[in-house]
Amino acid sequence: MSGGSVRHLYVHLPFCATRCGYCDFVTLVGRTGEHGAYVDALLRELALERDALADPLDTIFLGGGTPTFTEPAALERVLASLPAAAEVTIEANPETVHEGLTPVLARNGVNRVSIGAQTFNTALLDVLDRRARPEDVRRAVHVLRDAGFENISLDLIYGIPGQTAPDLERDLEQALELAPDHLSCYELEAKPGTRFTHAHGEELGRQADAMEGYFELVVETLVDAGYRWYETANFCRPGRESRHNLAYWLGRDYVGIGIGAVSTVGARRWRNAPKLRPYVDALASGRTPPREDEPLDPATKARERLMLALRLDEPVPLQAVGSAIDPAGLARAERLGLAERRGGGLALTRRGRFLGGAVTAEILA
């Protein structure tokens, strides 16, 4: 039995069928012949970190990549080897969800599935280089519901080149028709210098000007539909918050395993290098994979805690972040109705949340 104190685990499964043009995550296309060796290494890293982990865990999140693209036997080996946890989330692209997948997930403790829908507009899916079609999203949700999965999240993206406000309205309507328990709605962020920005640079500029209106449309539509706007880009039915992501936003310790994965434990953060072969080779020989280490002093931790917590609708305790606050900046934000103190804590007002990072920057020391 583990005697550690870390209650949150991230598992990175990097393989995808194709690479979306806007994506800057650590991903690998195809490589089906290497899935087994990667999982061998992943489980060795899990064994190395096991003493840091509590038993049972609060949350596990399998992200990618497309975790459900992982070769089925390799995916089941990962799932079967994970510690017990109250919330176990797996990310899935719609086209990878089928009747053969759901028993694998169910018998290995997965109880939350996050589906990357992104948009229901076929022309915009093509812009994003997405393989799945709108009917694949609907089918995936129905397959999961029929298999008894009660906690399903959908991801949407807005600000896609060629998108209009009515397009976004239709995306939200079609998402709501599927009655997801949780919705994550993200601004499109295209990394400078990629083929995507070269192809859509001028249109991305136009979309940037429309982002504020899109954001307000998302919030108003989903709140009116009964969802709680509990984090800047996240909305949920009662009790269906992403407990794993809340752990990040609340500054909890977590361990990440896999290429490119990040861990933050106590006064230390480390990031695994993103290259597959050095990762596999190091763990095959019993060594820790190549990593970058970063010490975290109390001031850095307080600043990060404040920046993340102000994304939430619940106040952050002032005693936890007081050293990170600029009193004059906070006074200005309060005077303008952008921030407020509540019960010994600090939160942004509704208006402040729409302005988000600009208000947070004003408050930070």
Image (spheres, helix red, strand yellow):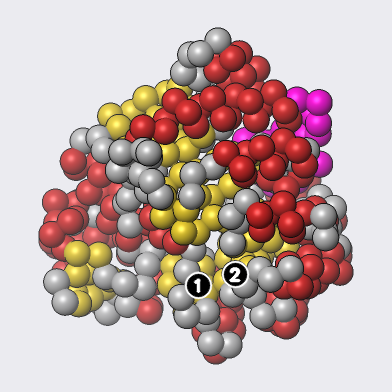
Q: Is residue 201 magenta?
A: no
Between 64 and 307, which is closer to the camera in this rendering?
Answer: 64
The quarter holding residue 135 reads bottom right
Element marked by disc 2: loop
Asked whether, in this view, residue 120 is left or right of residue 278, the answer is right
Query: Compared with residue 75, is residue 227 higher up or lower down, i.e. above or below?
Result: below
- Pick whichever of labels 1 and 2 is earlier in the sequence: 2
Query: Compared with residue 344, is residue 262 higher up or lower down, i.e. above or below?
Result: above
The quarter holding residue 195 reads top right
Instruction: Please state the extent of the stretch shown in magenta in the rendering.
Output: 16-34
Q: In the image, which disc is placed on residue 151? A: 2
Q: Are marks 1 and 2 in contact (CB under 8 Å)?
A: yes
Question: What is the chief secondary structure element of the magenta stretch?
Answer: loop
The answer to whether residue 229 of the structure is visible from this angle is no
Q: In the image, which disc is placed on residue 178? A: none
Q: Residues within 10 Å of mark 1 (few under 14, many from 20)?
A: some
For the N terminus, the quadrant is top left
Give the residue type at disc 1. Answer: Arg
Q: Residue at x 33, y 63 (%)?
A: 310
Asked whether, in this view, residue 67 is left or right of residue 32, the answer is left
Give the residue type at disc 2. Answer: Asn
Between 9 and 79, which is closer to the camera in this rendering?
Answer: 79
Q: Identify the residue under disc 1.
A: 240
Between 295 and 307, which is closer to the camera in this rendering?
Answer: 295
Query: Compared with residue 22, is residue 282 higher up or lower down, i.e. above or below?
Result: above
Please identify the residue farthest to the top as the structure is shown.
285
Between 95 and 304, which is closer to the camera in this rendering?
Answer: 95
Element marked by disc 1: loop
Asked whether, in this view, residue 198 is left or right of residue 42, the answer is right
